[in-house]
Amino acid sequence: MDRCWQFLSDKGLAKGPDGLIPLVSADVWKEDCVGKQSAITAHLSNTVAQEFLQAPSTSLRDRQRLVSSSANKASAWLISIPSAPELAINDSDFIFAVRHRLGLPCADGLPKMCACDKAALANDASHFHSCKNQKRTSITARHDFVVRALAKLFRQVGAVVHIEPRIYGSERLRPDLDITFPDLSLMVDVAVSHPAAPSRTSPTPLAAAAIVERSKSVKYNPLATRCASTFLPFVLESYGAYGAKAEEVLKILGSAARNSAISLPAGVGTFADYAAKTLSLALQKGNAVIARRGATESRAAAVARGTR
C-alpha cells in the first residue's frame, strides 16, 4: 500500500480532498477514494503519452500518429458493439487497424522494398497509405467505402442523395455527394488524409485534415454558391481523426435524425454516435484494403526482382 501510494505521488498525482490520492497512504481505502481508478489510470496514460511526444528520440512520424489517434472520435471503431453489419469488423481487418494505430508494419515478413521501388518498408510502416501505386486502386476504394457509408446515413435521416459517378481518367467537376433536404441543399466531398505521409511536416492536431479541407473548399465553394448550396468537405485522417468540417457534417446528421423516427442498433446512444462509429469502421475496412493490397504487391514484386 505504501509503495503504491508513493509511486502515484512520485508520478505527480494531486493529493488531498480535491486530488486523486489521499494525503497519506493509510487513507486510500476511505470511501471518498473509491471509484477513482479510471481517473488515476487516465492521468498516468496521459503522462506517458506526453513524455513520449516530448522525447527527443520520438520521430515526427510517431508524433503525427499519436496525435491523430488521440483525436476526438478517432477510436470510435474500437468501442463499437457489433450489433449491426455496419458496426462490425472482421478479425483480419481489425488486426490491420490495430497495427496501423500502433505504428507497426501491416504484416509480418514484408520485403525490404515496396512494389513502387521508392520506399524501404522498414523506414515507414504506413508507407502504403501514401504509396503512388495505391492512389488509384486501394486508396480510391477506401474513399468509396466512406462515401457509400455517408450516403447511406443521410438517406436514413430522410435526405435525397446523389453520388457523383467516377469517370476514370478525367477530373471530377462536382463533389462526391449532392444532398437535398426540404430546407437545405448540401454538397459534400470526401477525402482521407494520411498525417504521417512524407509530405506532411506538422505534428499539430488535425493539420493534415485542415490542409485538405482548405483545398476542397477552394475547389468547390464557387460551384456550391452558383447552385445555391452549402459545401462541406468531409475529411478523415487515416488514423481515424475527424476534420473540423466533418464534425459539422455529423451535427447536420444528428439534427436531421432528431426529426426522424429511426430505430438504432443496440450499443449506440444517438444517431450522431451511430454515424461516427459507422464511418470509423468504414475507414478501417478501407485501410485494411490498402494494407492487404500493398503487402501482396510488394511480395510479388520482391519475387519478380529475386529479392526478399
Image (cartoon, helix red, strand yellow):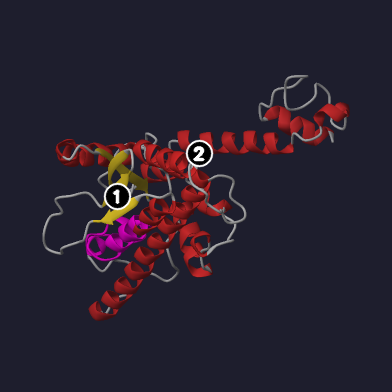
Residue 52 is marked as: 2
Helix, strand or loop status at disc 1: strand
Gap in Å between the C-alphas at discs 1 and 2? 29 Å
Residue 208 part of the magenta-drawn span:
no
Q: Nearer the viewer, residue 8 or 297?
A: 297
Picture coordinates of residue 138, whole percent (x, y): 30, 65
**Nearer the camera: disc 1 or disc 2:** 1
The part of the image, by quadrant, that contains residue 291 is bottom left
Q: Which residues are magenta?
A: 118-147
Q: Residue at x 11, y 59 (%)?
A: 170
Residue 132 part of the magenta-drawn span:
yes
Q: Is residue 284 visible?
A: yes
Instruction: Say if 249 sits above or below 132 in the image.
Output: above
Residue 191 is marked as: 1
Picture coordinates of residue 277, whole percent (x, y): 50, 51
Q: Amino acid at mark 1?
A: Ala
Picture coordinates of residue 73, whole percent (x, y): 49, 43
* Crowding at mark 2 (Cα within 10 Å: few <14, some 14-19, many 20+): some
The earlier-in-sequence mark between 1 and 2 is 2
Helix, strand or loop status at disc 2: helix
